[in-house]
Each structure stands twice: as C-alpha cells, then as structure tokens.
C-alpha cells in the first residue's frame, strides 16, 4: 500500500506546477497548494493529471482518486489554516461518489 501511495504522490508532483506544494492530508488523501493560479489553468492541470494517471496501468487498476485544489488568495494564511481548509473540503468530496475534483477559493 505504501508503494502505491508513493507512486501516486510522485505522479501527482510530476503532473502539477513546480511551485505547487503536494501534501498527504491524511490516510490516502493528498492536497495540492498552488499560489496565484487561475481556475482554468488548474482545470487543465487536473485534466493532465487524469491523463497521466490513466497511462499508469499499475495505479489506474489499483486506486481511484479525488483532488482538492486550493486557490490561495491570502499569502499570509498559515499552513494550518490551509490544511484545515483542505481537510474539510476533502471530507465534502469524499461524500460525493461521482465528483473527483474540487477547486476551492
């Protein structure tokens, strides 16, 4: 299981902007923090991530994923505030069996 999580984390990090922060939120859940990035750009990044994920047979056949992307408007927000925002939104998206992506401002 840890090998799969590590593979997914690497895929996620490689599919997202270099200035983004990818973090394991809890369990098998990851968050991505991107500073000053338009929603359309984020949507393209997400589509690229999905395409990269689909190319990886080992991951694609093993797991499903949901993604929370937080748009940081206030650069003075603490990492704890952003973490709480990611965590609460992850819980929302987990309750939706269809939605796999959420953009949060």
Image (cartoon, grey):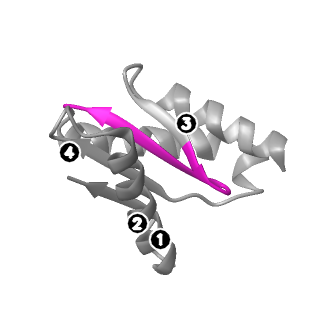
Query: Where is residue 84, by image quadrant?
Result: bottom left
Q: Taking 3 as reference, is 23 left or right?
A: left
SS label for mark 4: helix
Query: Which region of the structure is painted magenta?
Result: 24-36
Residue corresponding to mark 4: 39
Residue 32 picture location, percent across and down: 43, 41
The residue sitting at 84% across, 50% down in the picture is: 1
Query: Do callouts 1 and 2 mark residues in contact (Cβ within 8 Å)?
Result: yes
Q: Which mark is residue 12?
A: 3
Using the numbered discs, state the Cα–Cα distance from disc 3 to disc 2 in whole angstroms. Answer: 20 Å
Question: 41 or 21, which is in the foreground?
Answer: 21
Residue corresponding to mark 2: 88
The residue sitting at 82% across, 44% down in the picture is: 2
The residue sitting at 54% across, 26% down in the picture is: 14
Q: Which mark is residue 55?
A: none
Question: 83 or 13, which is in the foreground?
Answer: 83
Mark 3 / mark 1, whichever is N-terminal: 3
Report crowding for label 2: few under 14, some 14 to 19, many 20 or more residues within 10 A (C-alpha): few
SS label for mark 2: helix
Q: Taking 14 as reference, is 84 left or right?
A: left
Q: Taking 22 as reference, is 70 left or right?
A: left
Query: Do callouts 3 and 2 mark residues in contact (Cβ within 8 Å)?
Result: no
Mark 4 or 1: the one toward you: 1
SS label for mark 1: helix
Q: Which mark is residue 91?
A: 1
């Amino acid at each position: 299981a840890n090998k799969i999580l590590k593979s997914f984390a690497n895929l996620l990090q490689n599919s997202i902007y270099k200035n983004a922060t990818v973090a394991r939120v809890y369990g098998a859940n990851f968050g991505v923090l991107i500073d000053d990035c338009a929603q359309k750009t984020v949507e393209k990044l997400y589509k690229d991530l999905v395409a990269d994920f689909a190319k990886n047979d080992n991951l694609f056949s093993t797991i499903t994923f949901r993604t929370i992307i937080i748009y940081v408007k206030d650069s003075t927000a603490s990492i704890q505030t952003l973490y709480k925002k990611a965590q609460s939104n992850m819980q929302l998206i987990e309750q939706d069996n269809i939605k796999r992506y959420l953009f949060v401002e």
